[in-house]
Image (cartoon, rainbow, N blue to C red):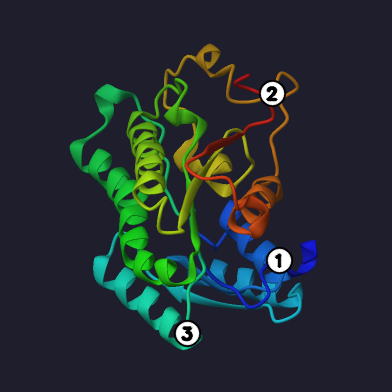
Amino acid sequence: MTLASRFEGKTAIITGSASGIGRATLIRLVSEGATALGVDQDEAGLRETVSLANNAAGTGGQASFAVGSIADEAFVKSTVEAFAAKNGRLDVLVNLAGILRSTHLVDTTLEEFRHIIAVNLEGTFLFCRQALPHLLKTKGNIVNAASTSASFGHPYMAAYAASKGGIAAFTHTLAREFILQGVRVNAVAPGGIMTPMVAGQPARFPEGANLSLFSNLTRPDGHFGRPEAVAGVIAMLASEDGEFINGEIIRIDGGTHS
């Protein structure tokens, strides 16, 4: 097995693939031979990702997409079942879809809090639950997206941090629950990675925010990491190179929380 062929004959579903870490991960797995399905609500972004992935495809690698919300139980069920039926197997699930809102806690509505939990945490749960019967057959694995906000104080991101803390706990629990059945479950915890979620309007600091509280979100030189840096770690975890890594939350933040 070479680095360029780690996923030959393997299939994968990657949520949040329209941009950022999800896009980089889908391209990386397909470049190493995976037959991969990208999932997102952004159809234009997904089409661009799939085009880039197929242009970079390794031997046997191929990308396709499905448009829909990961918080929609019916969509999750039909998407996983259709992909597994078409390909005869499912080897890898990567849950990267998520949303971030930066808001003062006292200004956070219950609706907003529940929406973030529904997408980030419940969406991860739905895909894991639907994929696990297939992953048990292939002795496959799951990589979830936690965040440094799950373990360190990130101000004005209470709902987001709560959802990511839930994903971290969920990951530990699944890893232990299926440890004797051959399915590994890990998570990555990105920090300051330059993605549309970080750069876009939803993540900008709320009015009156104390910027001194954000000193641990980027390196002292202001440098942000690339989505490809996270994708490389995900590819390692999801491949045979990660065969003895299970139940881990791997921090990828350039040392900002060291």
Determine whether the residue tagged by mark 3 lies in a helix, strand or loop.
loop
The type of residue carrying mark 2 is Arg
The percent position of residue 215, horizontal first and vertical second, equals 59, 16
The type of residue carrying mark 3 is Gly
Left or right, 244 with reference to 241:
left
The percent position of residue 33, horizontal first and vertical second, equals 70, 73
Q: Earlier in the sequence, mark 2 or mark 3?
A: 3
Q: Are marks 2 and 3 in contact (CB under 8 Å)?
A: no
The type of residue carrying mark 1 is Arg
Quarter residue 62 falls in: bottom right
**Residue displayed at 47% across by 14% down:** 210
Left or right, 81 with reference to 110:
right
Comparing 109 with 93, the one in front is: 93
Q: Label 2 to label 3, Cα distance in Å?
A: 45 Å
Quarter residue 30 falls in: bottom right
Instruction: Write down the residue under mark 3.
Output: 88
Q: Earlier in the sequence, mark 1 or mark 2?
A: 1
Q: Residues within 10 Å of mark 1 (few under 14, many from 20)?
A: many
Considering only vertical position in the picture, is 1 above or below 183? below
Left or right, 110 with reference to 209:
left
Instruction: Write down the residue under mark 2.
Output: 219
**Residue displayed at 50% across by 46% down:** 186
Instruction: Write down the residue under mark 1.
Output: 6
**Residue displayed at 72% across by 68% down:** 32
